[in-house]
Amino acid sequence: MTGRFITLEGIDGAGKSTHLGFIRDWLASRDIAAEFTREPGGTPLGERIRELMLSVDTKASLEAETLLMFASRQELVSSLIRPALDAGRWVVSDRFTDSTFAFQGGGRGVPEARIAELERWVQQGLQPDLTLLFDVPLDVAKQRMAGNRQLDRFEQEKADFHQRVRDAYLRRAAADPRFVVLDATRSIAQLQLDIAAHLAQLAERG
Ligand code: ADP
């Protein structure tokens, strides 16, 4: 029995983190054992990389940024994701490799083939079973983040960066059936109904 691997993706402010609690409750109510994690981060090394990557003081080349994201991911896959899935537990991650394709690829212009190469090395065929893409127009995301807190290194990028990130996500989603694109402009309650239906489908899958 192997667990299921779910990832949450979207531009900053789309609403990913808001729904983590709902997913946690949904799985707990069905006695499904699950791990919750996030990227970059999720391990002691990964959390240090997260701090570096989100700090507005960090200067990094495109390549260094991409490699650090995969360094964090390698640690997370080998120490948490693989062991949990092998033990039959589900794993829910706030961001995973689609974020690298969207932010470093779409946003910053790192060639997709380079990212795919690192993906193969680090994941050895591991892919999410379900990726929920929270999709909102930029102005909605911006409004949701307004006044929240200080913006991190990615959040403070210009609008055209976030537009390229969103476009890259949508292109990936169109090409791969593991994605479910959620119109995240809807109410939290409406989104939860939708998310519950997709979780139920995944739980029933043999
Ligand atoms: P992300 O994790 O994708 O960056 P968050 O989950 O932190 O985004 O959401 C950003 C803000 O938007 C939060 O203040 C949250 O309460 C609000 N929010 C999230 N989803 C919705 C929604 N569907 N409708 C209205 N507000 C929302």
Image (tube, rainbow, N blue to C red):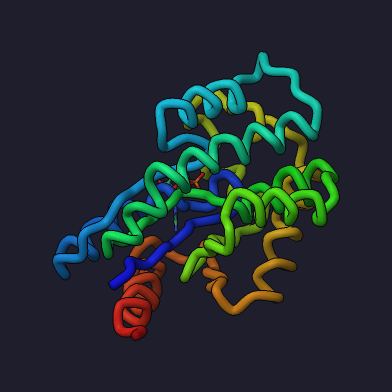
- Point out residue 4 in the picture as x, y percentages from the top left corner: 37, 67
Instruction: Tell me the quarter of the image containing the C terminus.
Output: bottom left
- Of residue 12 and residue 122, the one placed in the foreground of this image is 122
Residue 51 lies left or right of residue 142; in this view the side is left
Between 198 and 113, the residue placed more toward the observer is: 113
Above or below residue 46? Residue 199 is below
User: How far across and down, in percent of the image, does residue 94 sit?
Assistant: 46, 49
Can residue 185 be seen from the camera position used here? no
Q: Residue at x 55, y 74 (%)?
A: 178
**79 horizontally vs 49: left or right:** left
Q: Quarter of the image containing the N terminus?
A: bottom left
Quadrant of residue 199 in the image?
Answer: bottom left
Percent across and percent down for residue 174 are 69, 75
Q: Give the image quarter of residue 78.
A: top left
Residue shown at 20%/65% (left/top)? 32
Q: Position of residue 74 (x, y in %)?
A: 54, 42
Total number of numbered discs in the rendering: 0
188 on left or right of 55: left
- State the residue lying farthest toward the top: 57
Observer able to see residue 104 = yes
**At 70% from the left edge and 75% from the top edge, which residue is drawn?**
175
Q: Report the residue at 67% width, 14% height from top.
A: 57
